[in-house]
Amino acid sequence: MTEGMSLRERKKLRTRHRLLAAATELFAERGFDKVSVAEIAEAADVSKMTVFNYFSGKEDLVLAPMEEHVGDVARAVRDRAPGESALAAVHGQFLAGVENRDPSVGMSDAPVVLRVRRLIVETPALLTRAHAFSMRSFDLLAEALVEEGEEPYIARIAAAQLIGTRNALINANHVRLLAGDPADAIAPDAVALAERGFGLLADGLADFATRA
Amino acid sequence: MTEGMSLRERKKLRTRHRLLAAATELFAERGFDKVSVAEIAEAADVSKMTVFNYFSGKEDLVLAPMEEHVGDVARAVRDRAPGESALAAVHGQFLAGVENRDPSVGMSDAPVVLRVRRLIVETPALLTRAHAFSMRSFDLLAEALVEEGEEPYIARIAAAQLIGTRNALINANHVRLLAGDPADAIAPDAVALAERGFGLLADGLADFATRA
DNA sequence: CCAAGAAAATATATTGAGTCAAGAATTAAT
DNA sequence: ATTAATTCTTGACTCAATATATTTTCTTGG
């Protein structure tokens, strides 16, 4: 696993893991805001500055793993089969994630995932940062659509609709997981809600919530 | 305008305006991050703590005026005519804003508005905070839809689609205004793009960006 | 009109996140 | 092995934000 790495690189990786472990431990114990970066540095036996060298902010000590998924949606659209619409690609990628119980679509009930998730929802700074990832996800999707020849402004509108829908679906999963439901119990509902949510997008909101 | 206010209240309002003016001035001159709150306090002839007494953070010195509009969309939906859909209400409210050259839909080319807008887009901290307002806007809209009897998860999905579309339209306006186009020049395009964007939502994305 | 009480502004101190310039350690090249 | 280039680490610093105590300013009942 670490072969082909220089001493420097191996050390770096170990330090990174020490920092993540120390931070998660302390945050889970006392909450995000009640732990200072200095304490984390001390627990991982490095200087405060080194923490910022490895992570671009205190928030990233929690959210770094999530960052790898910002390109998922755009990739799904780029890689879609001939004849498939962007919406179908996004829908399909979501369903695959549900099937795999993937944390990136809010479908893992692993204790460590839930603990981190709980930490995120009850910490405004983390929610904000998580939202920034979603923004990035949106940008990448819009870019992918533009590269396919869609008009930029239209691409951005469609991307907003697709990402917004997906986020709402992920959120619904989080709500249920944090309420204590096991992933296996909510998976069928997640699939059904996705059908309706993306269905709304496919068929239109024209008559939605029409006042009596 | 200020009748019915005690001397204290009038003074308070004036101090608030002094602070906003001083902050905007300094930020425009040297950039958000290069100005300290202490300097703003000094320029407005007030103590540092008073700044935090009037505004909940440095960011609000720029974004406070925007906060008043977080409820606009939800209100438009609540107040819509019988027979009108939620989408039509949001669309209508947007068109009205375009017509009035309202900054809240990105349609004012007043120099001071443009300066603030430029400041926001080039300052990550401000973008983040602005995004939080949009989040609030979304929550309020979802709430309004739930109160009308829509299922909560569906309401949140629809709200995400509506707010996302609207934000993308507003963004398009900002891009063009910052490129130097006058509001009168972009208004017709804004109306046309809204037609297409909300049209996408009304008629569905089913065939959008289908791969050849 | 004035004195007592309420509200607001100020001065000052503390905490904690994030930046910077300079030095220490690792790697690569001669 | 010596040196040069690169990368890591650090201590000292800046600044936002909070907390506390003191002073100034406004209101109001007698």
Image (cartoon, coloured by chain):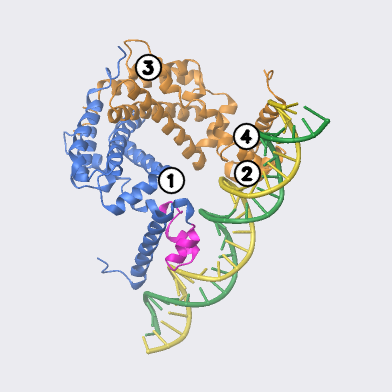
Chain colours: A orange, B blue, C yellow, D green
Q: Which of marks 3 and 2 is in front?
A: 3
Q: Main secondary structure of the magenta part?
A: helix
Q: In which quarter of the image is residue B75?
A: top left
Mark 1 and mark 3: Cα distance apart in space: 34 Å
Q: Residues within 10 Å of mark 3 (few under 14, many from 20)?
A: many
Tell me the residue that label 4 is attached to: A24
Q: Do the residues labelled 1 and 2 touch (CB within 8 Å)?
A: no
Task: Provide residue A12's location: percent of width, then percent of height.
Answer: 67, 30
Whether the residues at callouts 4 and 3 have beta carbons within 8 Å, the answer is no
Give the residue pinned by disc 3: A89
Residue furthest top as drawn = A82
Question: Horizontally, is B27 left or right of C11 in the view?
Answer: left
The mark nearer the N terminus, 4 or 3, is 4
Q: Is mark 4 on a helix, strand or loop?
A: helix
Q: Which of B97 and B30 is in front in this view?
A: B30
Image quarter where the C terminus of chain B lies is top left
